[in-house]
Each structure stands twice: as structure tokens, then as C-alpha cells.
Amino acid sequence: MALRQIRELGDEILLKPCRDVKEVTPRIRELIDDMFETLYDADGVGLAAPQVGILKKIVVIDIGDDPHVLINPVLLETSGEQRGNEGCLSVPGKYGVVTRPNYAKVLYYDEDMQQRELEGTELLARAILHELDHLEGKLYVDMAEDGLHNVEELEEENN
Ligand code: ZN
């Protein structure tokens, strides 16, 4: 396993749509392992392949329950609404206020290319929707209702 460089805002690869994964090759497995290592190293809850420079539909998420690998995810259903702070490993030190559905259900393939479903509410729904946006070249910064804020300001508020 190895850490991968996280691409940051301004890197055009973050704005490009991703291609489907047709087969989980050893290289793809290595990419997934590396994505988890990079995610945990950066203390994040989700990472999409384009964030490490690979335009493939792969997302890893871990909000502290279980690690999830979503290959070729497709959004099936959303409902409700949540408004809250959101950040991105590609936009370090910043956060924004983003309103999203409070529930999301996705169809995806696991590492054995078995079709599965994942549903979540609150933080898991937010993470799923944020990461799926990455696969379409969309960033939360364009949805933040009041622009971006510095994380330090948030930490001061909490203290
Ligand atoms: Zn992100």
C-alpha cells in the first residue's frame, strides 16, 4: 500500500467525469487499498478516485462504522433534507454550508463485482452524495450557500 497525492482545487482532473470500472484487476485492488490508506492518513470520511488522479468510478467511504467501497455507484433514491457543514480533502482547510438530502440509497458493485445496495442517513448520506458528485466532476464548493470558510474559524466557534 502507498499514500497517493490528493489533487486539490484548481486541478482540472477534479472537474472531469469518470469512466465505469469494467473489471477489478490487481491494479484496481491496489488503487482501492491506497485510497483507504490515503483517506485514513488525511483523517477524512470519503475519497473518490479522481481525487487521486484516476478517472474511474470508485469511491471509498468510512464515517467510523465500516469501510465501504463503491464501484460504479448509481444513485437510486434520496429523501428529506439536511443542512450542514461540509469539507473536502481536495479543498484543505476550508468548509462550506451545503444542503443535501438526508437519506440516500445507491446501487453499486463491490470488489468482487457483485451488485449491492447501500443506504444511509445524515453523515453517511452526505458522504455518499459528496463522493458521487466527484465522479461527475462536481465539487461541493459550487453548492456552498455562503462561499467557503476557514476551518480555523469553525474550531474557534466550538471552543
Ligand atoms: Zn470531496
Image (tube, rainbow, N blue to C red):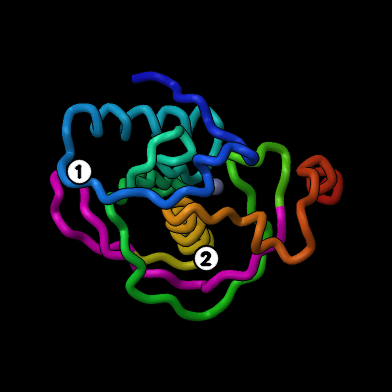
Residue 149 image label = none
Q: Kindly give the residue lying farthest to the bottom in the view shown.
A: 80
* Separation (CA) of disc 1 from disc 2: 25 Å
Question: On the image, numbered disc 1 is attached to which residue?
Answer: 111
The residue closer to the viewer here, 134 or 109, is 134
Cβ atoms under marks 1 and 2 closer than 8 Å: no
The residue closer to the viewer here, 150 or 21, is 21
User: In the image, what residue type sits under mark 2?
Assistant: Glu
Q: Is residue 127 above or below residue 3?
A: below
> What is the quadrant of residue 159 in the picture?
top right
Crowd rating for badge 1 (residues with CA inside 10 Å; few <14, some 14–19, many 20+): some
Q: Position of residue 119 (x, y in %)?
A: 35, 66
State which mark lies toward you, 1 or 2: 1
Q: Count up the numbered dots.
A: 2
Q: Which of the two discs, 1 and 2, labels the residue nearer the N terminus?
A: 1
Looking at the rendering, the stretch of residues picked out in magenta corresponds to: 96-118
Q: Is residue 153 above or below residue 118?
A: above
Question: On the image, numbered disc 2 is attached to which residue?
Answer: 122
Main secondary structure along the magenta-highlighted residues: strand
At horizontal 32% and vertical 30% (from top left) the residue drawn is: 31
The residue closer to the viewer here, 11 or 32, is 11
Q: Is residue 122 above or below residue 14?
A: below
Q: Is residue 64 left or right of residue 7?
A: left
